[in-house]
Every structure is written in C-alpha cells, then in structure tokens.
Image (cartoon, rainbow, N blue to C red):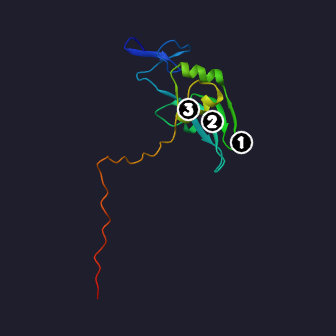
Amino acid sequence: MIALNGQFRRSSCGAVKNCPGPTLNLKIKTMLSIRFFRTGKKNQPFYKVVVCDRRNAARGGRFLEVLGFYNPKTKEKQIKQERVEYWLGCGAKATATAHNLLVKEGIIKGTKIAKHKKLKKKEWSIGWVAAPKLQPPRIIY
C-alpha cells in the first residue's frame, strides 16, 4: 500500500501493487475470496461463482462480480476464465470448493484440496495391554 497524505491507496480489486484499475481510499486491507453463492429452490441448488469480501457472506448481492455459475444437478457450468485469472492476480483466494472446481475446469493448475477431514485412528503405545473385562460376581441362592 502507498501512503499518501496519511491515507492508504490501493486498487479497487484489492491488490497492493501491479493491478490496473481505479484506486480507492481505504484504511484497512480488504481480503477477497472467490466463492459460491447459492441460489435456487429447496432441493434444487444452483450456485453463482462470485468475488466478494472474505469477512462477509455474499448474500443479497453484496459481491463485486459474478464470474460464472455451477449447477450440480445437471453438472452444467460456465466460468469466465480471464476474469478469474484477473481476480487471482489481484490477490483473491478461492475457497476449497471453488478451487477444486477451477482445477477441474483447467483454469488453475495444481492439485485439489481435500475438503473433508479424514478420521484419525487411535494410536496405542507399544507397551499398553488391555485389561481383561471384569464380570460381576455371581450370587447363588
């Protein structure tokens, strides 16, 4: 960021430098993310791929730009590759699910991110021995 007259100047896309576009006077650095914005009816999901501020959800049209859409029911998708590359160049980071979609489409090169954590198995120490199961005493009448 460049300090001019006590104010920070940066480009509108959130980059600190090397990013074209008009500048905004902002005191704090905005973190941008490429994420899904869910639309559609109940049990009929439809997602828009949008760029928004990472701190807030993208509800109610509070996002900077729509980059495309994804319909998981019909597997239909359309993403603007040049705009995704522009926003990634400006410092935006994709969420795990959006990153996996971009890798699958070939827009980003790399490996997919594991979204779900794997269950950890209990590791027992070598010297540990299980105690025998105790039975309650029998009462004979």
Dot 3, crowdedness within 10 Å: few (<14), some or many (≥20)? some
Mark closest to the chain's N terminus, 3 or 1: 1
Q: Residue at x 31, y 71 (%)?
A: 135
Q: Which of 99 and 69 lies nearest the eye of the viewer? A: 99
Q: Which of 6 and 136 lies nearest the eye of the viewer? A: 136
Q: Residue at x 52, y 25 (%)?
A: 92
Q: Are marks 3 and 2 in contact (CB under 8 Å)?
A: no
Q: Quadrant of the N terminus?
A: top left
Q: Quadrant of residue 89?
A: top right
| Residue type at numbered disc 3 | Lys
Q: Residue at x 66, y 36 (%)?
A: 70
| Residue type at numbered disc 2 | Lys
Identify the secondary structure beneath mark 3.
loop
Q: Which mark is residue 128?
A: none
Reading the image, the residue beneath label 1 is: 74
Identify the secondary structure beneath mark 2.
strand
Position above or below: 25 against 117: above
Mark closest to the chain's N terminus, 3 or 2: 2
Q: Which of 37 and 89 lies nearest the eye of the viewer? A: 89
Reading the image, the residue beneath label 2 is: 48
| Residue type at numbered disc 1 | Thr
Residue 52 image offset from top left, x and y in percent: 53, 30
Mark closest to the chain's N terminus, 1 or 2: 2
Nearer to us of marks 1 and 2 is: 1
For the residues labelled 1 and 2, the Cα–Cα distance comes to 14 Å
Reading the image, the residue beneath label 3 is: 112
Position above or below: 108 against 6: below
For the residues labelled 3 and 1, the Cα–Cα distance comes to 22 Å
Q: Quadrant of the C terminus?
A: bottom left
